[in-house]
Image (cartoon, coloured by chain):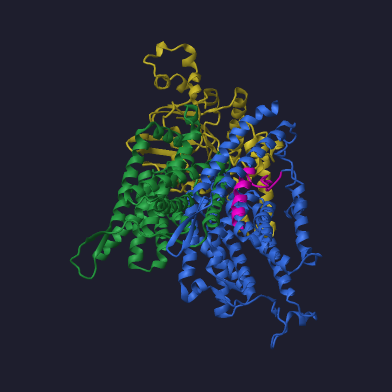
Amino acid sequence: MGTLSRLTPHLKDSLAAGLLAGLLALPMLGFRLVDSAQGLSLDYRFTWVAIAAATVFTGRLILLQAGDAIRRRPSQRSASTQPQAGRPNKLRPILGWLFIAGALVLPWAPLADRNLLDKATLLLIYVMLGWGLNVVVGLAGLLDLGYVAFYAVGAYSYALLSQNFGLSFWICLPLAGLFSASFGMLLGFPVLRLRGDYLAIVTLGFGEIVRVVLLNWQVVTGGPNGVSGIQRPSFFGLPFLATAPGKTTFHEFFGLPFSPDHRIVFLYYLILVLALVTNLFTLRIRRLPIGRAWEALREDETACRSLGIDPTKTKLSAFAIGAMFAGFAGSFFATRQGFISPESFSFLESAIILAIVVLGGLGSQIGIVLSAFLLVGLPEWFRDLQQYRMLAFGGAMVLIMLWRPRGLLSNREPTIRLASAPSRVAQTAEDSV
Amino acid sequence: MASDSLPLLAVEHLTMRFGGLFAVNDLSFTAYQKEITAIIGPNGAGKTTVFNCLTGFYKPSVGRLSLTPPDDGAPHLLERMDGFRIAKVAKVARTFQNIRLFTGMSVLENLMVAQHNKLMRASVYSVAGLLGLRRFRNQERQSLEIAKYWLDKIDLSDQADWSAGNLPYGSQRRLEIARAMCTEPVLLCLDEPAAGLNPRESLQLNDLLLDIRRDQNIGILLIEHDMSVVMNISDHIIVLDHGAMIADGTPVAIRSDPTVIRAYLGAADDEDLPPEVTGDLRPAATSGVR
Amino acid sequence: MEYFLQQLINGISLGAIYGLIALGYTMVYGIIGMINFAHGEIYMIGAFVSLIGFLFMGIIGVTYVPLALFIVLLMAMLFTAIYGWAIERIAYRPLRGSVKLAPLISAIGMSIVLQNYVQLAQGARVKPLQPIIQGGFELFTGNADYHVRLSYLQIVIVLVTVVLMAGFTYVITRTSLGRAQRATEQDMTMALLSGVNVDRIISTTFVMGAALAAVAGLMVTLYYGVIDFYIGFIAGMKAFTAAVLGGIGSLPGAMLGGLLIGLIEAFWSGYFTIGYKDVATFSILVLVLIFRPTGLLGKPEVEKV
């Protein structure tokens, strides 16, 4: 009886949803544009419309009924979502160490093969980019929609420096970071006074400008063909090759049999170290006056000014530091791929990195690892479903936001506590996350 | 007015125009060290505008605002300085009518952020800080002591690790004052610090402000509607109406000034007013509570 | 001189289209303060619905061009408006009042979904359409080498835009719907307390924005004759730039911004390298924002402390 009375409104609701789905599907799924000899012609697929409407109707009905069933059960977790303010969170440092330990032993894990390590490397690039962008968006609260531009600057810096001047990766890495940071300053100086949304559109525009310049400046960047044959990384001068005339190779030096996997493992550790350095840097700088000023600026710029904090300089430093890490990641990307083109630096990449930061929970370092895994790691396994992958990716962005608008891990840990503040020992233990 | 303290802030001919409206019109007054100077007046009299000019949020249309530091340095001309420099160099701190704490950050962090410039210098572009050099650690410890002192003063030591936004309203008001004090100002501008406080909290506020006046070598400018605060702690009251000063004197003098009473109540005749009103301007305070 | 005039005509037509899309951005931003990132995709869907509509007209035998145009216009506006409504309902409304970045991320996600949905449903190849409105005037025929062309289509584009613009100005400034919209824009809570159905007003805003984007989509389909699933991103970005340039939240500003962007593009491509036209657009945006941070027609914001 009770179920039935609840069913009627649900039925109505679901019918409306089904109808809406049908209407949405009618023009797009119901008709299909096909190329024919006479130009375009139309094809009909009204069954698809019916399927879409029916799926949404059933799905909605099940969801509503299930939601009811859950709601009827006495809920225990209603009040426990926010932990008490003032109590340090013990779980997260442990989680952090576990991640690091797992990442360290991964190449020796039984299931680890080339493929897995490649994917893990890619994932770590995104984790590093997420951590870098987190300084800008998560800490300083500056909405940057063109972060990929700095990544591109880093990648092209390395590619061009090593091709034109024969500089090694280890010299180019800091240079790439420096170039990207300078670009960040150059862009940031005029625009950081702008309101948040304007900053978003200007950074978005800047990202596009960089891409357009890379595409059109043929003589330097190679245009759409990009730069290929970029020098691969060496183990501090020892190349990962079977034989190198006049040089000792990595496997010869260590007396190992040659294996192409060495390079994969090396790249994996390289990005792991780079990412961890980014993380460590962020964790430490968060506790410094500049880091606190970033967060204060995110909270209330007017109050910051009344306390004598220079907003422009403070924002600029966040922007430049974020850009620097993107530059590092970019030069790693270039050396790993051996080939770069403007295609790798589209707006979609910026959107993915931003999504990683926001979905992770602004400011949360571990949250970023989790969301990078969800958004980049998981879809990598479904590469065969290429076409549906991006659809699912976008859908996941929407759904996760609806489910947890503040991100996966959104509790903020204060940078200093009255209880633990005087002892440095207690702080270093927390530094791990 | 007779005062043995040294002048701290001299406001001369301050005028602020918004289009054709004179929010503040040819205002001149002086505030002294170790004194509480209250600015009162009906809503819209231009009190907050004066503060906004003083703290650099507005550029005055006309006028000079000179602040003479107690250590006898050259006077700072506030009307020529950028907003954040007024706080950083001239050392003028302020609070806001609608509290502006860093709500997502902890109470202690709010007080540490206020000591930003000092800590930044010690951290040498964050390099010394990143390396954890002693120079920086010492400064941090010292700043923490200052923060602790103020936490104790405003009775929030137990809530130091709470998010500032989770504090009750009265505590937020006090925290904002403490945060301003952590910048080690020479002039503290308080914009309606008692608004929204209950009588007990108002009394606490009085004590806090009197303590600050006694212990710190600073001047306080106070905008307030709550006459129980104004009359009890001010050394010197300036009354504004329609952007112009209509009275300037001690609480006793202001209390019985007919111009002031007329401005507040719009009454034509003083005799029409009941004695408790002329004795105490409190009824006007209701308009200030939001 | 003739060449200049030609670029002017082209720039105005292009600018009118950008302006129509920009209106959607500016209305939504004005009312709920979010960048509706999926708006470019709405426009793209409008273009696809129009294209499908024209082919459908051909199949059912409506060959009288003005009638076909009118029916397709209505269809495109209707179906696109449903998309606009649904997106707000599904992806934005639950996030209203949440952290500021949440709706933006949701919108970016929605934009990715729509782009890939259309790609999957209609294929990734560019879709050509035979010209439907042909012909035009030849102006300044004095110069034998170069004739300035003002096509009928360009006239239609500008006319439709002007009519729509006038209609919208009327709705916003003269009707109770417009009043409710402006009230919601000023203070959502207060509007709600005064009995304004805020949810419905916001939905209406999205529907109106989407309908305008559909018109832009239709006109682009006619103007360029080719569309693909990716056109929404670029056009959306330019239109948003236009909205910011004109002063976000201001309807005439959006139109003006659109016009300017159109003109900049046309003249830059006409006189300089076409490859860098987007660089020119964004550089001008940056310059305007630096010297006039609220955009050309935006109201200066007085900081309240």
* Letter of the green chain: C
Residue C137: image x %, image y %?
Answer: 24, 59
Identify whether A295 is placed above or below A378: above
Q: From the viewer's perspective, is B74 left or right of A94?
A: left
Q: How many marks?
A: 0
Quadrant location, the N terminus of chain A? top right
Nearer the observer, A178 or A206:
A206
The reply to whether residue A219 is visible in this rendering is yes
Residue B17: image x %, image y %?
Answer: 36, 38
Residue drawn at x 73%, y 76% as measured from the top left: A260
> Which of the 4 quarters of the picture holds residue A385?
bottom right
The reply to whether residue A297 is visible in this rendering is no
* Letter of the blue chain: A
Identify whether C93 is placed above or below A214: above
Q: Which residues are magenta?
A: A389-417
* Letter of the yellow chain: B
